[in-house]
């Protein structure tokens, strides 16, 4: 068994999607010299870095992240590998259908775009999931959708109105092979949260020689 960390570290340089998203700041408020310990104040938006979107993020009155059964954050998931992927090239429903195996599980979309995280044009150049592909995944009864990219606003509406959380901006997907994994997506427990930063891990069974 191997555990792969799919989380981008929190830093002061994490990019934000819109100018009105709060910037991430890590500020030391105590030091060993003055206080005999270290303490860091963390300021971060609910949709920065590796995070999970709740339906209430885009749909008023819909469930918040803390209302989900915590069992959802530990699921069987299938990795769908679309690498290498060109900038802005949509992932189609036909491409998804050609790879999807079992219904009713989590899905991890691998494009390799996590290597561009932090670049100025990251949110403008990623290869998006098409609306038709999102609809197909809804029809496949997936439990959650994760990707090493952001998601378009349309895809947010398509998945979140059906109550399917979005796990956004995965990291280290080059270490994932196509196939089944156990996916741990652990969001911060924020009361009434429209989303939350998350620690996301993949548990992969090692192939024996």
Image (cartoon, rainbow, N blue to C red):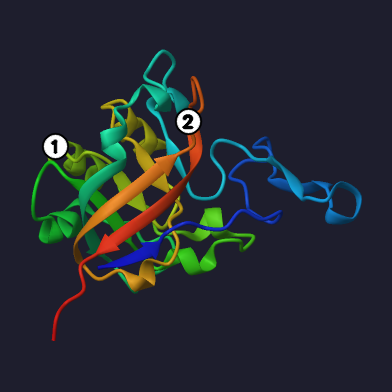
Q: Locate residue 194, reporting x and y percent.
A: 48, 27
Crowding around mark 2 (Cα neighbors within 10 Å: few <14, some 14 to 19, many 20+) is: some
| Of callouts 2 and 1, the N-terminal one | 1
Category of crowding for the residue at label 1, using alpha-carbon neighbours closer than 10 angstroms: few (below 14), some (14–19), many (at least 20): few
**Horizontally, is 205 left or right of 31 in the view?**
left
Report the residue at 61% width, 63% height from top: 119
Q: In the figure, is residue 200 to the left or right of 162? A: right
On screen, residue 21 above or below 8: above
Question: Image quarter for residue 2?
Answer: bottom left
Can you say which quadrant of the picture contains the N terminus?
bottom left
Evaluate if marks 2 and 1 touch, with contact meaning CB atoms under 8 Å apart.
no
Residues at marks 2 and 1, CA–CA distance in whole angstroms: 29 Å
Please provide percent x and percent y for residue 22: 68, 38
In the displayed orientation, state which residue is furthest to the right.
34
Q: Residue at x 13, y 86 (%)?
A: 209
Residue 139: assigned label: 1
| Image location (x, y in percent) of residue 104 | 13, 41
Whether residue 162 appears in this view of the structure is yes
- The image position of residue 20, as x and y in percent, is 68, 35
At 84% across and 52% down in the image, what residue appears? 31
Tag 2 residue: 189
Question: Is label 2 in a helix, a strand or a loop?
Answer: loop
Total labels drawn: 2
Q: Residue at x 19, y 37 (%)?
A: 138
């Amino acid at each position: 068994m191997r555990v792969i960390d799919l989380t981008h570290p929190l830093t002061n340089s994490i990019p934000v999607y819109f100018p009105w998203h709060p910037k991430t700041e890590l500020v030391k408020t105590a030091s060993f010299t003055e206080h005999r310990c270290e303490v860091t104040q963390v300021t971060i938006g609910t949709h920065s870095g590796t995070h999970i979107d709740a339906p209430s993020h885009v749909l008023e009155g819909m469930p918040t992240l803390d209302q989900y059964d915590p069992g959802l954050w530990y699921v069987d998931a299938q990795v769908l590998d679309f690498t290498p992927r060109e900038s802005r090239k949509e992932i189609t429903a036909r491409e998804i259908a050609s790879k999807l195996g079992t219904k009713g599980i989590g899905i991890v979309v691998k494009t390799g775009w996590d290597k561009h995280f932090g670049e100025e044009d990251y949110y403008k150049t990623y290869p998006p999931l098409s609306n038709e592909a999102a609809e197909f995944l809804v029809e496949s009864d997936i439990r959650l959708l994760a990707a090493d990219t952001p998601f378009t606003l349309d895809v947010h509406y398509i998945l979140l109105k059906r109550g399917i959380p979005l796990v956004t901006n995965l990291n280290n997907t080059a270490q994932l092979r196509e196939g089944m994994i156990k996916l741990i997506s652990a969001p911060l427990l924020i009361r009434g949260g429209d989303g939350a930063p998350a620690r996301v891990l993949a548990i992969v069974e090692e192939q024996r020689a």
